[in-house]
Image (cartoon, rainbow, N blue to C red):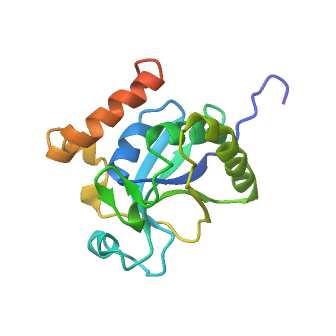
Amino acid sequence: MQGEESHQANKKATFGGGCFWCTEAMLEDVEGVLDVISGYAGGHVKNPTYRAVCEGTTGHAEVVQVTYDPDKITYKRLLELFWQSHDPTTLNRQGADVGTQYRSTIMWHDEDQFKEAQTSIKEAAPLFKDPIVTKLEKLDVFYPAEDYHQDYFKHNPNAGYCVYVIQPKMKKFKQYLGGKLPR
């Protein structure tokens, strides 16, 4: 009908940028992001547990699955935020968190995301002194993490990891966004 706006259906994106508590905390208040779920993907074990993933035997990465409104934020913009949310130049490590479960990964859902992610890596490369080691992996299955991992930073802002790791990352991320996370 004339005068009606066309709305796209909500979409999903899946990213691994180290500990999922950090990535979740940074992305969940971004305008256009509707939901962020911490979970596991990219491995060979069905229904993995946090303990098994931390042991490094499942092949899974800690990831977040982002549901977003493409009328308010693009996949390209989410990729730009992903580069700012972690160090994509360290292989299987973010700070003191070490292991393949902390790998930098973009888990693409379709060919369009794959192509955009490839382009984004090339565009982001000059921003970093060292080469980007982020893996592009086709998302097979996403397993939500246990309930106590969801909204971890919101529920545990005074926990040691939140104070010493997440809060400094959030501060840097907010500076990148001009001092605030729009909502």
Residue lying at the far top in this picture: please name it: 178
Question: Which is more toward the observer, 24 or 84?
Answer: 84
* Quadrant of the rendered image containing residue 101: bottom left
Relative placement, left or right, of 134 versus 183 is: right
Q: Quadrant of the N terminus?
A: top right
Residue 183 image position (x, y, % from top left): 45, 26
Q: Which residue is pictured at 41% across the width and 22% down the height?
A: 175
Residue 182 in view = no
Residue 109 image position (x, y, % from top left): 64, 60
Question: Which is more toward the observer, 102 or 71?
Answer: 102
Query: Total label count?
Result: 0
Q: Is residue 76 above or below residue 20?
A: above
Q: Is residue 60 above or below residue 30?
A: below
Question: Which is more toward the observer, 56 or 128?
Answer: 128
Q: Which residue is pictured at 57% across the width and 49% down the height?
A: 132
* Quadrant of the rendered image containing residue 74: top right
Q: Is residue 21 above or below residue 60?
A: above
